Image (spheres, rainbow, N blue to C red):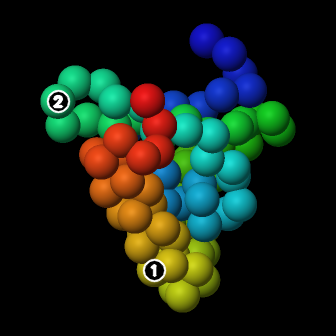
Amino acid sequence: MNQEIFRTTDFYSAVILRSFGVPLIDLEKSGLNTLVFIFQNETENCEELLKKYWDRKLSVEPRAFIETINELKIRIHQSKGGIYGS
């Protein structure tokens, strides 16, 4: 797997990564009701950010977290309408 790309189907993992500025490259459909969030992982820090999140060693500014949830929900709905992603 390409180390410069990080993929996840977990919505809240995607929210954490976007909250910390990791670029979202694309959304990819996988099955009928599953989307894969594809992130640019140049510094290979996605795994480290998520590890800190699950270990409760990561703090996220609440407003940024909520705004990122809204941003990704919009992208999901656009994806379902065929506007974003393939």
Say whether residue 82 is left or right of residue 39: left
Residue at 46%, 45% in the rendered image: 84
The reply to whether residue 43 is visible in this rendering is yes
Comparing 7 with 50, the one in front is 7
Query: For numbered disc 2, what is the local secondary structure?
Result: loop
Tag 2 residue: 32
Question: Label 1 to label 2, Cα distance in Å?
Answer: 27 Å
Say whether residue 45 is left or right of residue 75: right
Residue 17 position in % (x across, y down): 59, 54
Residue at 43%, 30% in the rendered image: 86
Rate crowding at label 1 as few (under 14), some (14 to 19) or many (20 or more) other CA atoms within 10 Å.
Answer: few
Q: Work out which residue is located at the far bottom of the displayed protein and give it.
A: 63
Point out the tag, 1 or 2, that comes first from the N-terminus: 2
Rate crowding at label 2 as few (under 14), some (14 to 19) or many (20 or more) other CA atoms within 10 Å.
Answer: few
Residue at 60%, 59% in the rendered image: 18
Which residue type carries mark 2?
Answer: Leu
* Quadrant in the picture for residue 3: top right
Tag 1 residue: 66
Residue 56 position in % (x across, y down): 50, 65
The reply to whether residue 13 is visible in this rendering is no
Comparing 42 with 34, the one in front is 34
Say whether residue 27 is left or right of residue 43: left
Q: Mark on residue 7?
A: none
Which residue type carries mark 1?
Answer: Ile
Residue at 31%, 56% in the rendered image: 77
Say whether residue 21 is left or right of residue 65: right
Residue 65 position in % (x across, y down): 51, 76
